[in-house]
Image (cartoon, coloured by chain):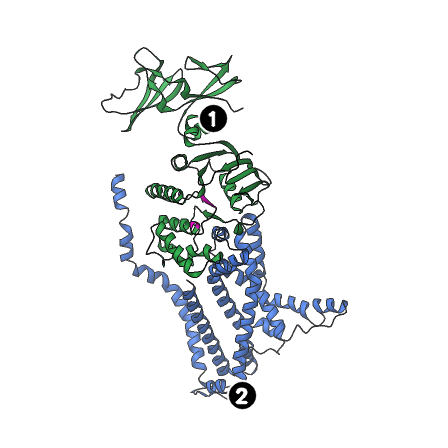
Chain colours: A blue, B green
Amino acid sequence: MSAGAAIALPAPAPRERGRGVAPIVALLAPIALINAVGFLAPVLNLARMSFYEVEPTGAMREVYTLATWAKVFSDGYYAGLIFDSITVSLGITLLTLLCSYPIALYLHRSSGTWRTILLVLVISPLLTSAVVRTYGWIAILAENGLVNNALATLGLAKLKLMFNATGVTIGLTEILMPYMILALLAGFGRLDPRVEEAAATLGAPPFTIFRRIILPLTLPGIALGCLLCFVLAVSSFITPKLLGGGRVFLLATEIYDEAIVTLNWPLAATLSILVLIIFGGALMLYSRALRAIL
Amino acid sequence: MSEQGFLSIRGLTKRYAAFTAVEDLDLDVPRGELVAFLGPSGCGKTTSLRMIAGLVPATSGRIVVDGKDLTEVPTHRRDMGLVFQSYALFPHMSIARNVAFGLEMRKVPKDEIARRVKEAIALVHLTGKEEHRPTQLSGGQQQRVALARALVVRPSILLLDEPLSNLDAKLRDEMRNEIREIQQRLGITAIFVTHDQGEALTMCDKVVVMNQGRLEQLGTPVDLYERPRTAFVASFVGRTNRLASVAKDGSVEIAGQRIAAPAGLSGPVEVMIRPHRIAFAPAGEGVPGTIAKAVFAGDILQYDVEVAGQILSVELATRGGETVLSPGTAVGLSWRPQDVFVYGAAA
């Protein structure tokens, strides 16, 4: 009996491989359906809307025109908007990476209860909405906020920390740090303390170990974290709106203004599609980077 | 301190908050010798090795190599090669780059690096795999790369931390011979941490048996096997029968026989005899016993013999033509006095 079972054991593997297609389709169907209805259709609708004609009143006519796209590409304002959005987001991503990397490295090396406590601390900001956290930053960065009052008490000049790119960068960096830390941790799998020790025994001083071993081995995590934070930074709306105070013009805030204030839906749609294209570019860069790293 | 070894360790101690991992270790290793640190897990052998490598700071004690005190020297300036149980190869580098790493750290000229890397890879029979990544190699091959990477820099001491434990039995034997052969050919001083007494006995010039952070015995494999100093060494190195008895008036009784007790020993003792040092006596002689179990294992015959209420394991080499005695058969056992070890029983 047992011999028969032992002989039968290896059989299921090839059989399962053979009949694989139907169950996979069945398992993927629900999410495919949800995505088709809830994501793909609206995006296609958005793409179509970007070609509609719009009257000064905001009324849309279902007449196809390239006018909106031509305006976006010819008007320097939008080129500047795109450039600012990308550079501010890249800056935020870099700052988030610099702030998060040591924390993620420390977390990766910690263990037991201490690690659990630290992980909870890292994740806990996500339990508070970005709106609340942004208002928190306003209390800190405002003209009569914590920082400036402290500076004034010390007899130093006040700093302009809000209603400019500085405020948006500070706020978004803090808000995005949990995502960056988690993404870094997810990508630190190949980092093994024994490998670092091996480098030390071979004569590598600490900084060389970081440069030659730790940094290259954590590149997948860095790439993942940067992709995630860049995408979140480009699409973030509430924090730039509140901390930018209408004086920092980024794609997401502009889309909101065009859709809600100016009521130019085709323009909002066009800019939304542009954001999607930027995401696509970021994803492409990410997969290129990964291929180069691994 | 009369004879100082190439590697000289004095009073090496590692204390953690709750326990002492290594206590007061003294050791001298002459140049070119392969010394095993043998003991059960948690005995302090790996901690000792890591202190020698500088990966764990010593609580107290000194580590001196070739007359140079290394106790306070950081790992990267100790010039030791370490081979890990888990290989610890750099996964993002090719085999050649892995092996070249230590030479690059030493700022060796490029053409010399290329030549020495080639030699080291040839030494471990991996020529042709230079551009492979570590994950493309088998466990045994990866351990060879680790060995080449540690040896290529010509370290003062080669440290091996259970290098064979992750390999399967056949590869283990192969690597065992290979490591020993390379170590002897290069004449390198090496320390080999293992929990496997077979590896320690067959590969090494000397063996340090450790238990609970302390050195139990240091000696050649023959010393340890034939003259174990403590009950722990006797039972950990090789297999042995353990019998409880009492020492009184300078002698110990085992199975109705009295033998001389070691000087100054009285009270409860442990008596040990190796199974293959027990022989069957001619009919009517020796210590009487009854066969409880018989196992024919090809090269040896294993008997469990009941003697005065205790079971003794007996092993006889087969020469062909033996009759396997069945359980219940009365037999007489004999042994030479020098094969009986007596130790004071642990309190």
Q: Which residues are magenta?
A: B150-164
Mark 1 vs mark 2: give the one in front. 1
From the viewer's perspective, is A228 left or right of A248? left
Q: Is residue B335 above or below residue B192?
A: above
Cα distance, mark 1 to mark 2?
A: 99 Å
Where does residue B165 sit, x and y in percent of width and height?
A: 40, 42
Q: Give the residue type at disc 2.
A: Thr
Q: Position of residue A131 (x, y in %)?
A: 60, 68
Q: Is residue B209 left or right of residue B138?
A: right
> What is the quadrant of the N terminus of chain B in the image?
top right
Snapshot quadrant of residue B196: top left
Q: Quadrant of residue B68?
A: top right
Q: Residue at x 50, y 61 (%)?
A: A183
Q: Chain of mark 1?
A: B
**Can you identify the residue that label 2 sits on?**
A57
Label 2 element class: loop
**Residue position for label 1:** B231
Work out which residue is located at the far top of the displayed protein and give it. Answer: B284
In percent of the image, x 48 and y 55: which residue is there?
A191
Q: Amino acid at mark 1?
A: Ala
Which element is circle 1 on?
helix
Q: Are marks 1 and 2 in contact (CB under 8 Å)?
A: no
* Residue B276: image tag: none
Q: Magenta includes B252?
A: no
x then y, percent, for residue A161: 66, 72
Establish if A116 lies above or below A291.
Answer: above
